[in-house]
Image (tube, helix red, strand yellow):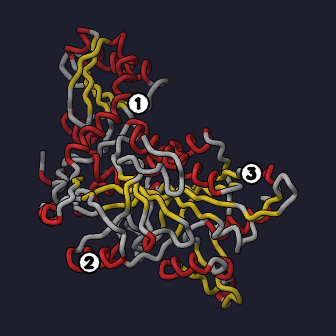
Amino acid sequence: MSDDLKLPPKSDFSNWYTEVLFRTAIVDKRISDSRGFYGYPPYGAQILSLLEDLFISELKKTGHFPIRTPTVIPETLLEIEKEHAEGFAPEVWTITHGRDNKELNIKKVLRPTGETIIYSLFSYWVRSHADLPLKTYEVRSVFRAEPNKAVFPLMRTHEFYWIEAHDVQENLSQANKQVSEDIEIFEEVIRNKIGLPFKRLKRPEWDKFAGAIYTCAYDVPLPDGKVLQIGTTHNLGQNFSKPFEIKYENDQGQLKYAYQTCFGPGISRILGAIVSIHGDDNGLILPPVIAPIQIVIIPIPKKGWDKKMIEFAENTFNTLKDNFRVYLDNSDVTPGRKFYEWEEKGVPIRIEIGSREVEANKLMVVKRFNREKIKIAFEDIIEKLEVIIKDYPNELLKNVNVELKIDSTDSYDEMLELVEKNTHLIEIPFCDDPSCVDFLKDELNIKVRGVPLFEHGEKSVPECEEIAT
């Protein structure tokens, strides 16, 4: 294989990552003067859409309904909840002029997140306890004015894609239960269907979402030693319902301020994490559930067998197409080149068809993530492939957990040793005192991410009385 086809090694993470995204048509950043705003070709857009569908399915199962709300927000609306406004102030894109380039009387902002615009509507939508719980979600892009030097495709961009779930409850207990439900949804999609490990953390007070009682975050260690936040859940208490006048009449005729939660799976960032964690020197490794093509069929030409081979390949395609997202590659490119290109694009399963397979009425199945080869009888192919696809996330998870560096210690000296070894995440006993946080940050260049949830017998979520098992 010529060197111009080879990707940089994954050990050269930044170059490998950006090259993989471009070569596999996930992200296109060739728009002039538009750093941080990217295009997403069909292959990448399909992956994003399939990923969104996983969360939408789980949200619908739990009684959530879709809504649509504006992208442009009056600046005055953003400022209603003071702490929230201050928290987002450095990241806001402001619109100062409108039609005929006239200066606006009231400035507008590109939506950095949806609380203010959605909750101004909730104040009209919620009237009675019969309206609660109100469970909604919206699939959309949002805008953050990130520092240009920090921009990195999918992970940190000026425009990114996510899902916002915004819920309204009668009391704090119901709000806490909703937080637990959000965590379960994230666990089901990310760990069970995507095979991606992550840490569930309660953010410390100084790092929680502006306006929240507490924040639960989902963090993924990256190959370059950094940690990526791929989603959050916030218990907002009454911090937004009071300034936005979200009240309901209870069953005794009394007006009460509602409680609220919000949940944000970062779709762009999750895809960035999938590329980073599952990928290897040969390119993407996609979990089948989000792969635009789950199975590629590649005939291997041999003189005198071409007609039989094509017929067998087409029969295989027709047998599989109603059960899987499958593609038959009949192009004139050499089999070796096809293998390389489809591996680079992360297709989970390759079916090789040579003269031996045709003669034996069997198929050679190759898993992308470990290149394991399995010969399967034609009559068993659907059943066997269903098992392989079902087991794929667990196999990915096992494969990843071996490589991720997550350690725990109660020794200060051992902690320093682990830092020197470039361990991604270290669990240590911690008092949560700001002075200790400053010491770790200033003296040791360590950032405190938060307190693990559902581990070591702690309560399942802050303020909740149930113990995790």
Quadrant of the drawing holding the N terminus:
top left
| Residue 130 visible in image | yes
Image position, residue 422 (x, y; %): 16, 62
Report which quarter residue 364 is drawn in.
top left
User: Given this view, does label 3 or label 2 mark the residue nearer the observer?
Assistant: 2
Quadrant of the drawing holding the C terminus:
top left
- In this figure, which residue is indicated by the disc labeled 3? 132
Q: Against 398, is 94 above or below?
A: below
Q: Is residue 135 left or right of residue 443?
A: right
Camera-side residue: 200 or 54? 200
Report which quarter residue 73 is drawn in.
bottom right
Looking at the rendered structure, the kind of residue marked 2 is Phe
Q: Residues within 10 Å of mark 2 (few under 14, many from 20)?
A: few
- In this figure, which residue is indicated by the disc labeled 2? 439
Whole-number angstrom distance, CA of label 1 to CA of label 2: 54 Å
Could you say whether the residue bearing mark 2 is in a helix, strand or loop?
helix
Q: Is residue 277 left or right of residue 423?
A: right
Which residue is at a point 44% across and 20% down the rendered structure image?
318
Looking at the rendered structure, the kind of residue marked 1 is Val
Mark number, residue 326 = 1
Whichever of callouts 3 and 2 sits on the residue coming sooner in the sequence is 3
Q: Residues within 10 Å of mark 1 (few under 14, many from 20)?
A: many
Whichever of callouts 3 and 1 sits on the residue coming sooner in the sequence is 3
Whichever of callouts 1 and 2 sits on the residue coming sooner in the sequence is 1
Could you say whether the residue bearing mark 3 is in a helix, strand or loop?
loop
Report which quarter residue 353 is drawn in.
top left
| Residue 138 visible in image | no
